[in-house]
Amino acid sequence: MHGVMYEMFTVMNRIPVPAAAADGFEEQFGASMGQHLADVAGLLSARLLRPQNESGVYVAVMDFASKEAFSAWMQSLSFRAAHQSSPGMAGEIESFETVVAVGA
């Protein structure tokens, strides 16, 4: 199978959340995403993934048009505001460059 090659930079943040705090976390994190990510230049998509096992580790996934777009967001007021309004939501951050993608 051949995919389309294009530039995209993906950041994944693995956030451990105790089961008792999951509902509040989803509500707070979702509200923060809606408030602070709507107009981020170069942001293609942002998702919060709920764990389907007992690990309690959520994954926030953000796709940017480029590494430079991600770096610009990291320096922005939007980034600072999002992280000030959501303290304690940091986790293990990983970043990836897209090599091949198939589908929408």
Image (cartoon, grey):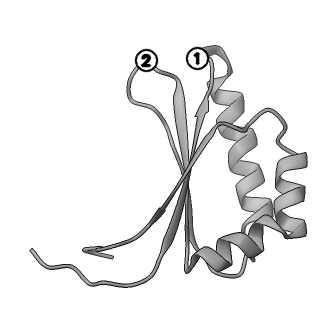
Marks 1 and 2, how far apart at CA: 8 Å
Given residues 29 and 62, the one toward you in this image is 62
Where residue 67 sits in the image (x, y, percent)? 59, 74
Q: Residue at x 54, y 36 (%)?
A: 58
Image quadrant containing the C terminus: bottom left
Where residue 88 sits in the image (x, y, percent)? 79, 32
Toward which corner of the image does residue 7 lie, by quadrant? bottom left
Q: Which mark is residue 102?
A: none
- Label 2 sits on a secondary structure element that is loop
Q: Is residue 19 left or right of residue 86?
A: left
Toward which corner of the image does residue 68 lie, by quadrant? bottom right
| Residues marked 1 and 2 touching at CB (< 8 Å) | yes
Given residues 83 and 66, the one toward you in this image is 66
Q: Residue at x 30, y 84 (%)?
A: 5
Given residues 72 and 78, the one toward you in this image is 72
Q: Residue at x 30, y 73 (%)?
A: 101
Residue ID for mark 2: 54
> Which residue type carries mark 1?
Ala
> Which residue type carries mark 2?
Glu
Given residues 24 and 51, the one toward you in this image is 51
Height in image: 7 above or below 47? below
Q: Residue at x 64, y 14 (%)?
A: 20
Q: Is residue 102 left or right of residue 1?
A: right
Instruction: First in sequence, mark 1 or 2: give its number.
Output: 1
Q: Is residue 62 left or right of residue 101?
A: right
- Label 1 sits on a secondary structure element that is helix
Where residue 66 sits in the image (x, y, percent)? 56, 79
Residue ID for mark 1: 19
Image quadrant containing the N terminus: bottom left
The residue at the far left in this view is 1
Where residue 56 sits in the image (x, y, percent)? 52, 23
Q: Is residue 63 left or right of residue 22?
A: left
